[in-house]
Image (cartoon, grey):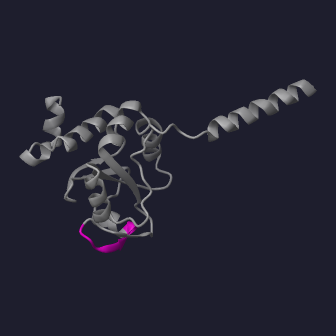
Amino acid sequence: MHKHLKLAVLSAVFAISAALAPVSASAADFIIEPLDYDIPGEVEIAAEEGKNLVVMFSQNGCPYCDKMHKRVFPHPKVSAQFNDAFVMFEINIKGDLEMVSHSGEDTTEKKYASSMRARATPLFVFYDKEGKDVLRLTGYQEPGIFMTAGRYITSEAYKDGTSFVSFVRSGK
């Protein structure tokens, strides 16, 4: 009996340490925790690094937001593409943190989410390097379509009037 107890304790310790182990650096380094939630400031910093900003509107308990964090963001191809080309942070659609909207207005997360018509989560808003929102995707996105959204933004296909749907259909 004593031997089984030791084995159970060792198994539990191993399971806990595996669960608490840090995620590899390659997984979702593009996700940041901004200090001041200043969208124009984040767009400017990202642009200086040659990147675009993505804002993910989410809420506590959102199963599709969790699924994005667990299945899509750590996907090796997604994290490689987005680490190179994007910076992303989350806004809680029910949150009260003060922030600066993309138009430079002082507001709160909740008010900004409402003004952006963010009701269903997750909602991804991709900004160009000038701070204009150029693509919105609502809901869980499989890795392939999320990567296609990234290519749509980095190729700047939106500038010539190509819609995201047309871009997807073209297979680019």
Could you tell me residue 94's position as x and y percent? Answer: 43, 64
25 with respect to 144 (left or right): right
83 with respect to 18 (left or right): left
User: To which quarter of the image does residue 170 belong?
Assistant: top left
Could you tell me residue 16's position as x and y percent? Answer: 69, 38
> Residue 57, can we see it?
no
Q: Quadrant where the N terminus lies? A: top right
Residue positioned 26% across, 65% down in the render = 102
Residue positioned 13% across, 46% down in the render = 158
Name the foreground residue: 79 vs 70: 79
Region rendered in magenta: 103-110
Residue at the left extreme of this rendering: 160
Residue positioned 19% across, 34% down in the render = 168
Residue at the right extreme of this rendering: 2
Name the foreground residue: 149 vs 154: 154
Could you tell me residue 45's position as x and y percent? Answer: 30, 58
